Image: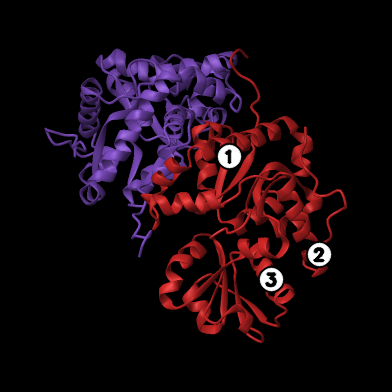
Chain colours: A red, B purple
Amino acid sequence: MPGMSQPHRRPRVGHIEYLNCVPIYWGLMRSGALLDVELTRASPVALNDALVAGELDIAPISLVEYLRHADDLLLLPGVAVGSDGPVLSVNVVHERPLADLDGGRIALGSSSRTGVLLAQMLLTERLGLTCEFFRAEPDVPRMLEKADAAVVIGDVALRAMYEAPKRGLTVTDLGAGWRDWTGMPMVFAVWAVRREFAEAHPGQVKEVHEAFLRSVRLCLDELDVVAEATSRWEPFDAATLAGYFRSLDFSLGERQLAGLRVFAEKAARRGEVPALPTDGPALFAV
Amino acid sequence: MPGMSQPHRRPRVGHIEYLNCVPIYWGLMRSGALLDVELTRASPVALNDALVAGELDIAPISLVEYLRHADDLLLLPGVAVGSDGPVLSVNVVHERPLADLDGGRIALGSSSRTGVLLAQMLLTERLGLTCEFFRAEPDVPRMLEKADAAVVIGDVALRAMYEAPKRGLTVTDLGAGWRDWTGMPMVFAVWAVRREFAEAHPGQVKEVHEAFLRSVRLCLDELDVVAEATSRWEPFDAATLAGYFRSLDFSLGERQLAGLRVFAEKAARRGEVPALPTDGPALFAV
């Protein structure tokens, strides 16, 4: 039939609707790449679940969840959400100094997978504390009614960083804590494709991957514009947002992969995730 | 608090996920306007309901539904989905010539509001036929099992235009039918803002309106690029899509408003909608 053919299905792609991923959304938008994906915008936890359940083909996934499901997934090299030092939005909020929290209760925000595990590592392994950890809704004042410290991520954590000091609370940046401890960048989320989808549609995955790489490059060039545009709708001014975006590391190169492997090894030693294969993580490559 | 302020809520804006609105989505994307709205992509019927229910602030709405709720809404001038002649995607599909359908049964696709009323006007008022009309799921072969003609819109109608002839069926273009009858362009959908939202947030509405106007201009300049990009995921090739996009009229100027008023008057005479006020429709203006 002239003019008609069997259509392909667009790849089902996830996007984190937190502030930290606005620059990447900007890049996907400005480059026109949104037309070539069926985009689902949701919280990190919802995206983790959807990717693992096969309801999405490609999505950002918390590093810990990736490690738990590494057999089914391939990482997209070059794109991640991490930091090489302070990240501003993965925080422990506490009243007493961290070193005084031995025997204390630590509330772990339910929206976090990697951040809360990182907090546990730092408190128990680096500081040698014994604490009681429990899950809680990510609401700092309520968490601190029942706990000595609260671990939160994302917009809630970013907000806490600005609000906590005036309430006499201290904020410990877990990206900075990790770098001080290991000398490494921290990777909080990676982009992964389901292995079976990559095998069936390598060309589509290559294109989406390239679109993400283009988006990261494009948004880094336009961070001040993104910050200005975003500030209209958020409780942060443009300068604050630009500083936040610049604190994030959207790359996933050798140095970030090395940091990822150190985290994976520590996490496996704690029994939280299976060990990565020695040549892991498995990367997508056409 | 330095760096922080009370944020505004982004306007809740609807977008039709049919092919006919891909050019406008392209424009919203490329211009960066998506960052300033909370976009809901859905079918026209779902958007109609959401706008009327106040779950969206600004959305495209079927002309008929607009006329039914004109008291609560203001039109955004300059943007619409219509045609000044053939529209390709609002069709009657039939076996016998239309003039032979007196006493026949006509299936009206449930996804359409304005298209099905236009079909009824043309069949009964212009052709003087008496038909039995009934609602049905928009699936042409199934509709024609129980009816002598099927009225469909959107991607289903566009597809029927290409597939029907090889099955010995005739396709009557309702955009062309309206122009032959009245000499006017037909407006199938308009963009409207809830009156109360426009009163509360005139500046935001002005910006969204300007973003739509920019998107329409931008996409008209890039229709071949949009068609090429879209053809990868649809059952139509780039040339077919470009032809389709060019058959659409995304403008809403004096000539389109005149056509809209003629339709509104006919619809009111049939008792389908309340009459427009003599100076109607009420347009948004800052």
Q: Which mark is residue A216?
A: 1
Q: Is residue A174 left or right of residue B5?
A: right
Q: Residues within 10 Å of mark 3 (few under 14, many from 20)?
A: some
Q: Which residue is mark 2?
A: A268
In this view, the residue in front, B142 or A73, is A73
Label 2 sits on what residue type? Answer: Ala
Label 3 sits on what residue type? Answer: Leu
Looking at the rendering, which quadrant does residue B237 occupy? top right
Q: Secondary structure at mark 2?
A: helix
Q: CA distance from mark 1 to mark 3?
A: 30 Å
Q: CA distance from mark 3 to mark 2?
A: 15 Å
Q: Is residue B127 left or right of residue A230?
A: left
Q: Chain of mark 2?
A: A
In this view, the residue in front, A224 or B46, is A224
Q: Which residue is mark 3?
A: A122
Can residue B275 be seen in the rendering of this structure? yes
Where's the N terminus of chain A, which quadrant? top right
Q: Position of residue B29 (x, y in %)?
A: 46, 34
Q: Residues within 10 Å of mark 1 (few under 14, many from 20)?
A: many
